[in-house]
Each structure stands twice: as structure tokens, then as C-alpha cells.
Amino acid sequence: MLKTISKMAVYGAVAFGALTATAQAADEYKLGLVTFLSGGAAGPFGVPAKNGADLLVDALNAGTVPAPYNKVGINGVKINPVYVDEAGGATKQVSEYRNLVERQGVNAVVGYISSGDCLAVPGVAEEMKKVTVLFDCGTPRVFEEADYKFVFRTAATATMDNVGAARYIAEKVGGLASVSGINQNYSFGHDSWNDFTTSLEQIKKGVDVSTKQFPKIYAGQYGAEVSALMVNPAEVVHSSFWGGDMEAFLLQGAARGLFEDQKVLLTCGESALYKFADNFPEGAIVGARGPNGVFAPKSELNDWFVKEYEARYGTKPTYPVYHMVQAIMGLKLATEKAAANAGEIPTDEAVAGAFEYLEFDSPAGKIAMTNGNGHQAVQEMVFGQVSKENGEVVMKDVVRYAPSCVNPPNGVKAADWIASGFEGAVCN
Amino acid sequence: MTALLETRDLAKNFGAVTAAADINVQINAGEIVGVIGSNGAGKTTFINMVTGYLKPSSGQILFDGKSVIGRKPREVMRDGMCRSFQVAQLFPELTVMENVLIAQSLAEGKNLSFFSPMHTPAREEKARAILKEYEILEYVDETIATLPQGVRKLLDIAMAMLSNPKVLLLDEPTSGVAIEDKFDLMTTVMAAVKKSGAAVLFVEHDMDVIARYSTRLLAFYDGRILADGPTGEVMRDKNVQTLVVGHHLDMDELEGTNNA
Amino acid sequence: MLSKNQIFVVAAAALMILAGLVMPYWFSFLVTVALAKGLVVLGLVILMRAGLVSFGQGLYYCAGAYAVGAFSDYFQTDNVLLLVLVAIVCGLVISSIVGLLLSRYRDIFFAMFSMAFSMILYGVLVKSAALGSSDGFNVTKPSLFGWAAEFNGTNLLSYWVAIILACVAGAIIWRYMRSPMGMTGEAIRENEIRVEYLGVSVQKIIYIKYIIAAVLASVGGSITAMTVGHIDPEMAYWTTSGEFVFIALMAGTGHVAAPLIGAVIFELMRTFAFQLSPYTWQMILGIALLSIIIFLPNGLWSLTDKFKKGAN
Amino acid sequence: MNLALAVLVDGVVYSSWLFLIAAGLTLIYGVMKILNMAHGSFYAIGAYSGASLIGVYFAGGNPPWASYLLLVGAALVAGLIVGLLIERGFLRFMYGRDEVVMILVTYGILLILEDAIKLLWGVDPYFAYQPYTLLGRTKIGGLSFANYDFMLICVTALVALVLWWSLNRTRSGKILQSVIHDREMAGALGVNVTKIFTITFVIGAFLGAFAGALTAPGISVVPGIGIEVIILAFAVVVIGGLGSVGGAFVGALIVGLSRALSVHLYPDGELFVIYGVMGLVLAFRPQGLFAIAGARKI
């Protein structure tokens, strides 16, 4: 017994050593990138985000990105991306985070689409004192429940999607008397619906809720839900569906004429705008979780980015791509700001210090790290309605809401802010 | 003297099929009763009912003065009625020793130990003694799945006898056993049983075995008891010979008539 | 008097505890989480030895974790002993109710019914906004009466607790498996009818085993909660329970050490599959699983027999 | 009234979908005693084959009506290839292993197939909506329903009928039944069990792929769709009684109608419906609704 186990231990140790002996070259900036590469979130979010990262990293290493990102790599050091699949839940992701930092020796981590992962990872990021940029997840709880030194989020929270959505329909949908909702049965779906209805209560009193449906995530079959929405009609159907679920819902709803009498509001709609263009109902209200994609403000940087992305992948970039790219850009600027000399990689403390309250330009316009004590970005929020001209999707009735109009002030919890009637909101 | 095991108007239906009806039997301490009947005549159903495995559709079963109905086989067994099975019911992937040790520790009492080992020298010694008594000690370390049928049958009966029952029900103890081994097997079993003083009821197809080992015979036909009495008398019964045995029995040349 | 094996276990545990000070943290973390899962699998192995496969051990894994999370949050305590105790009580209470029903079932029906219970907990948690819905919530790091066992910024307490709990549980279950109660499990798997006719209630034995397995699973859940610092309903999802079955079959049910060591090997396998092939790690895992089933039908533990034969 | 109608139609549509998925699973289990986790992958492969072919087909400007035949053809080819490959190339070496081990074997196959699908088709969604919208819609009691869904009900009824007829009224069906009831006895009586296994597995794989191909037009075909349907199919099969095709039919109806009822009357309960129904059925009928009777034990 004893002999056996010690023998096994020796074999184990040899195999183990062989696998962990990854050399740490000093002449590269190892960037850990965590995004969904499998499962239902890979198609709409994970892989486009990875594509965006690949594109940007290649361009940065070649030094071809327009100013202020024209320095090679990060502070002159070429970037070597290391990818990890976000699949498997928070426990595995915390484990993989440690592996990234210790075993692979990354200089920073950019990642996380799932809100659960975004809540779980910061704890270990703080423990390991490693700069970590959350790029896409939406839950406001990350910086509401704790203060972090090394964790940043360069995209605005999902609060702004639904505050914006409520403001938009109050403004643009005539005769609004009732809304209904179909959201996935998980945190993002629940939170989206809650933020939306509580905001609407503040903005326009007396709007009824006809029905609220919460089918299981990845259910794919929405026949009964569509019937329920048709039996209890409303002016606007709110949905934070994304990916295959959203597309299936749109197909099944359109086949039965649901969207002919009721307007559909899709807070994540833009993520399928190009692949699914034929089937978007005319007049669908679409958000892009920020000023991304079709809603991006005109800039040299965005023109360059869209052109490059389309040339490489044959489709226009959607919002997860923007979120990824702005995360890497923010990290690059903060790192370069913290560095004394070109070619050096500053300490995590220095980078974190430089990242706080950073303001920087991205393809999606200005990103301001004003919330969460300088760790959480706010952006403007944009909504518009789908219209097809000569087979091309264009947006009409576009309304832009300033960051201060749809995001709570620093230090105020989103739910409290909505309940207070958006205290301190400044709209244009 | 009251009977040890008594059934009154026992009946069992499976849907529209009557598996047993009007069964009135009394078995007294120390009796050795043979049971015959063609396939489907209700023999196993009878055993299954009196041991509590099947619930009768109607009628009563009294064992040692207590009703069996509504009680589980394990409770009936604790009162002193054990059985063997047509197909030996053992733990096939374990060894003979482990089978006996498990049977022993379960028979010792309802409150099983969580912590003290099952393998103790005392138990192992007793197990060897039992195996020796049943003449299967040579197989002690073999896995059940590799054993010949006869050994399995003996072990099955040995395990049933571990709790010193007052009544032992043997369901076809010699089925599947080679003809030349049948008498050895029965002799071994009967010697062990006699020593314990238990009453025995055994189902058997082989009239030779019946003739040699039973003192009383029950003949089942179509779910009912056709005849009940001293073995010789029942065997001479015309009805029994035509309906149960299927041909005339010459009491002097019983060999070779078995048609299991 | 300690036997040779007992001395070996104590020595190995002491060595592992000391090794925690020098091993990379990612590894001690991995071992902690793996041992937590290993404890769940150990419980599963007890059931599997009785012929029952539960596809719902996630129920107790999750319940134990949520008990720790809710208790530490509500009572503002981070005492590791108290938290593990709370998880044990939680597992005990739930399983003694659910087990009454489940102990009547066998085979695939036991598997699916246990899964249904676990999925119902999942559903309830997803619906509970106060518990963070599907995002879950963060759990405080444990301490031992205020001592957090901090070394270079990393909390080693949960690692040590996991090692000690795994060894203690392993030793207890090792004895249990050899006791009449434990061996009755094998007997039930092999032949329930015979067990009934030997005068013992099969249902009662299964009930007891179910509770033991549940308690082990909730202890595993409590360790995971304290180590990861975050819990979510995913822990009760059927895929989590499926992973436990996966580890159990991969490791083999022949020895108490098999599930514990198997869990560590599984975690290593998974994490290196993640690292080497982020895009196709499932395929690597699938191939590894099938290879084990083909070449080591009795699980990884059967390797030890081969080693033994080779050594002699 | 309107509500009752909606519940009925929605329920039956969902039930047909469930039955299509569960039929192959229960057939394979009944004959081979393998609870096939990879059944979801067959569904996914059917959906991907159907959707990608439909895409190419319509891009070529071909007559739209033939696209339905294309869906069936895609499922047939996909089921045949995958079924044969897995059964002949792998599973047959594993027969005789424990039922639980076989679940794990098929889980391993599922993991491999999931990534194989990803490597073959990528992660971008595939759409095949033309056959879905082509048939138009019908208004019943003020509510519009997609005609494609009605067609799905008919196809499911047809599949159920064909399965029932070939199992109960044909010689090969009776042979299959004998294998379902007692594999060893059937083998002893000279039934070529190996051949029966191959045929059953291929039919089961085809049914899974067929369900996927027929579902594809109404959904977005994306990674992971296979995994989502496994548990649904398992639950239906357990409710109906493992291995019983008729049971799966009734199980699908019960689950489908309960789900529709919940969506309309108590949307928050949707997540629990399937497990609730399964729990209730098992509590009262521990072997499912139409358990196949086993031989006497003692």
C-alpha cells in the first residue's frame, strides 16, 4: 500500500512538473482572456468578443491602432493572449483564475460575461492582487456590495439598459397603457425586468403589467409564452433575451403575428442585428447595452475598428466586441499611464492606481470610470427602432441618454436610485 | 397442541388469475412435510404468502399464534420462519465466507454495528463450522458466481438456518442439482435440520426425494390442496397420480420419474 | 495501537498540511476544492456500493454551501467549526425528510427522483432574489476563532480543514465500509430479497446510507463555499451532480481513498484540458473518460492493483 | 374559453415536440438498456444538418416545398451515419457493462460530440426559418398559431402510429418486443440480438436527429441545444415508464399540457413543472406510468 502510493506520487509529480513548466519570458505581456468558448453564450457573446480581442491584440502588436493607442502592444511590450473558456460556473472560474495568474503567470486578466462569475472572481483577484477587468457582465452588485482595489469594469451596468428602455418607451410609444415581459429565468432576466418596471413606475405612472413570463434559459420553445403574450396584449413586450433564445422567440413570435400588434423591446437586441437581420420585426426597439455597434458615435477610432473587423470576420462588430475592445484599451492606457519608462510592465498596484477614475476614448465613445469609487464605468445609453431600407437594417428614432441620466451617482445603489425617482439624474 | 403454522381459507388472485384458493394447512413442530404440484399449482405462491412476501387476497395465516398478514418477510423471519429459494438467493459477487458473515451479522440482531468490523475471528470460526456442517467448507474463499448449483443451494439453506428457525420452508431444494447429487444434498440438509429441531416444509418434483424424506405430503393442484396426509397415502391417491404426478406411481420403482 | 495504515494516513495528512506552506496556491486551492468534491463522491460511493446511483447529490452540496453562506451572513460569524457544523445539521435535516421517500426507490428511478429534488432546490434558489438568484452571493473567508491562517496573503485554513476532514471522514468511512452496516450495502446491491429474508429492512439501511451520503455532501459543499468565497444555484444543477457520478466511476468504488484521490486527478485533468485546449476541452475530457472506462473498467483505483502486482 | 384553447394547443404542440425527442431515447433504452445521454447530441446533429442544408438549399433558389423532404433526408442521413458510427465503432465493445457505466459511456460520447459539432459547424447560429414561415398561420378563437406547429403534431402522430404499428403488428416488431421483455431468452431462442441492437440504435439515432431537424426551422441552431433537451427527454421517459413508447407518448402529453397550464396561469412555476410532474408520478407509480413488467423474482 505504502509502496504503491509513493510510486504513484512519483509518477504524478513527474507528469505534473512537465505540464507546469511554462517559461515566463520577460519580453511579453501575458494577457488572460476569459470568455465563453462553448455553450449557448459562445455564439452571440463569447466568440465575437474573442475575435475582437484577437483583432485588437494583433493590431496593437503591429502598432497600427489609431492614437492614443498607437504604441506597440502594451507600453511597448508585445501582448501574448491566453484564452480560457468561461464555461462551468463560478467555482471552476475561481479555480481557473488562480491557474491563469499563478500557473500561466498572466500580467492581467480581462474577462467574464456571466454576472455570477463577475461576483465570484473579484474576491480572488483581490487576494492575488492582480489587475482584473470585467468586460461584459451587467450586474450592478459587483461594486455595490464590496470595494475592490484591483478590479475594474469598463462597461456600464445593465441598470442603464432598463432605465433607458423605460425612458425610451415613455417618450416614443404613444398611448402606452400596459407592458408585458418575457425574460429568462435567471438573475439577468429577473434584474432586467425589475429595473424596467420599477423605472417605468417612476417615469410614467399607471402603466399596467399584462403578463410576465420567465421561461428557463435556453428553453428554445416559446409557443405557450407567445400565446400568453397574445392573450394578454400590451403596447410593449419587454425582453432581455439574447442569443439563440432571442432568435427563437423572434421567429416563433413573428410566425404567429405577435409583433404586428405589439412592439417588442429587446435590450440585448443588437447582438443579433447582423446575423439575424432578415427576421427582425420592423419597428423593434433595440438596445446595444451601451453606445455600441450601430449606436457608436462617429469617430476615427470607430471607423478604423469597424473597417478592420468587417474585413477580418465578414460581419460588423456587435456590442460584446465593443465591450472586449474597450476593456483592453482601458487596461493598456492605465498600464502606460502607470509606467515610468517604455518597455517596462509596472506593478499591479501602480496600474490599479492609474486605472481609478480613468477617462478614455473607445470605439464606443468616451468611457468614464466614475462609479464604484473609480472602478466602474458609466456610458451613455442609446435606443432606436429597427427599420429596413433596401434590405439593410437602419436605426430610426434613435435617442441618446447621457451617462448621468441612466446611471446612478457614485456610491448609490441602482435599486435605491430608481426607487428614489432617479435622484440626481441629469438628462439632456 | 396448537399448530406452529396454520392457514385458514387462504387465497390469492393476480387479476383474474387465481393462484391459490381455500388453502387450509396446519404444520406442527418437528414435522417434515413434502409439497408436490405441477408448475403454476401455487406452491411458491404459498411460500411467498406465509413468509409475508406476498399479501394474500383473503384468508388468515397464523405463525406461532401470531398473524403473518401485513407483516414483512423480515419480521416473520425474526419470529422464526425462514426459507430457501428455488434459485439460490445469494450475494453473487462476494465470496462464500462473506456471504455467511453477512448472514450471520444480520441474523445477530436488527441494530447493526456501524463501526466494528464484520470480519471477526469468532464469526469466521462459526462460519467455518457451519460450512463444514453443510460440507461446503472447501469453497470458503470462492466467489458465488463460480460455484456449482448444488453448492449454491446448500449455502442458501445454510444461510436460512443461521437464525435457528422454528419452521424452514425449502422451495425446490434439489432443482438444478445433478440427479446423482440430490440425495447427498438432501441428506446433508436433513441432518442439519434435525439437529436444530425445526419443522420443514419442502417443495419437490422428484418423487424419490419425497418418498425418502417426507413423512407427510401436500399435493397442490390448480391453486388448491388436493390431498394432505401421510406421504405413502397421498402418493397412492388416484387423483394425485392423475392430476399432479401425471401417471401411475409404482411405489417400488420411483426412480427416473422426475420431470422438473 | 495504530496500525501501519493508520500511521501512513496520519503521516500523509501531516505532510500535506505542511506542504500547503510551500506548494503553489493554485494547487492548494485545487486540492481543497477537489477534496470537497471528493467528500461528496465518497458519500456517493457508499450509495453506489449499495447499488444506488444518485444524480442529485448536488442537492446537499448546494444546501451545505447555502447553509454556510446564509448562517455566516446572518450571524456574522466566520468560525470554520461552527460553519461546518451548520452544514452537517442542514444536510442531516433535509436528508432525513427526503430520504423517507427516496429510500423506496431503486435503479434509474432513484437516480431521476434524487435529481428532481436537486433541481427543485435549484429552481427555488433561482427564484430567490434575496439569495442573489442565479448569480448567488459571496461568502466570508473562514477563520478558526479569529485566526485566518494567512500566509503571504492566502488563506490556508480551508485547505487544512479540507485535508483534516477528508482524512477523518475517510478513516470513519473506511471502518464503516467494513462493518456489518457497511457490508449490508454490498449485500443489498447483490440481492435485496435475501437481505429482507435475513431479517433486515432494506429500506431502513438505504435510508441510513442516504443520510450519511447527504452529510458528506453538505460538508463538501461547506468547504467549497468557504474556499471559493462564492456560491450559486449551479451547485444544485444536474450537471454538478453528474460530475460527482463521473468522478466516482472514474475513480472506482473499491477503496475510500479512491474518490478523494480521483477527485484531485479529475480536477487536474480538467484544468489542464482547459489550459491546453480552451476550445475543445470537452472532447479531451470525453476521450479521457472513455479511455478510463475501456482500459480500467474498475476505475483508476484498479491501477493500484497493477502496481502492487508489478512491485511484488 | 380562449385560455382553455390556448392551453390545449400550446400543450399539444409542446407535447409533440417532447415525444419526438423522447421516442428514440425510450426505444433504445427498452431494447438495449442504455440510457443514452448522447441522444441530445443526435438531436443537435439533426438540427445542424437540417439547418445548414436548408440554408444552402434556399440560397440556390430551389422550390420551397421540397425543403420539408430535405429536412427528413438530412435527419435520415445524419442518424444513419452517427448511429452506425457510434454503435458499430464503439458501443458494441461495451455491451454487458453495468447500466450506470453505460450512462457514463454515452456521457463521454456526448462530450466528444459537443465539441465535434462545434468544430464542424462553428458557434454562429444557423437559421432555417423558411419552412417554418412558408406554411403561414391559422386563427383559432382569436389566436394565431403557426401551421408548421400543426404539421409537427401530425408528424408526431404519424411517428407514434408507425412505431406502434411496427412494434405490435409486424414480425420484426414482435422480435423487438421479445428482446425488450427478456433479452437472454430472446437470444436463446435464436434472435440475432446483435443485429437487433444495431438496428434499434440507428432507428433511435434517426428519431433523435429527426426531432432536431424538425425543430430547426423554428429555432436558432446554436451550441448547447442538445444538452438542454436531454433532461426533458429523460423526465418524459421516466414519467411514462422506461422503455415504453406508449408511456413516452402519455408522459409527453402530461408534461406538455402541465407546462402550458403553468405558463398561462402561473408563469413563475414553469421551472418546476417537469420535476413536479415527475415527482408526483413517481410518488404514486414508482416505476412510471407504463412500466414494462419484469419477470417474477423468486
Image: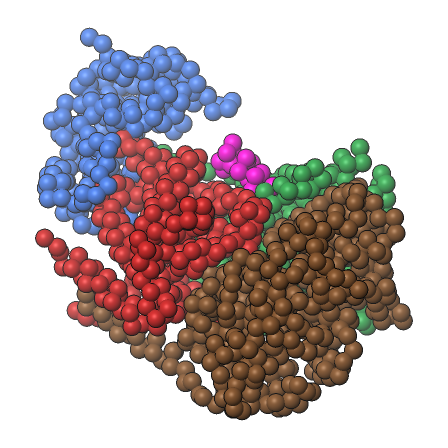
- Residue A113: tell me if it is visible: no
B201 drawn magenta: no
What residue is shown at x 26% (from left), y 65% (from top)? C16
Name chain A's colour.
Answer: brown
Q: Position of residue C137 (x, y in %)?
A: 51, 54
Range covered by the magenta-colored residues = D273-289
- The quarter in which the N terminus of chain B is drawn is top left
Q: Give the colour scheme of this rendering.
A: by chain
Q: Main secondary structure of the magenta part?
A: helix
What residue is shown at x 28% (from left), y 15% (from top)? B66
State the count of labels: 0
Task: Tell whether B35 sits left or right of C223.
Answer: left
For residue D290, above or below residue A279: above
Q: Position of residue C233 (x, y in %)?
A: 51, 51
Determine the image quadrant of residue D185: top left
Name chain B's colour.
Answer: blue
What residue is shown at x 75% (from left), y 43% (from top)? A209
- The quarter in which the C terminus of chain B is drawn is top left
Front residue (pair D32, A274):
A274
Q: Which chain: green? A: D
Name chain C's colour.
Answer: red
- Residue A318: tell me if it is visible: yes
For residue B259, above or below residue D157: above
Task: Tell whether D286 sits left or right of C227.
Answer: right
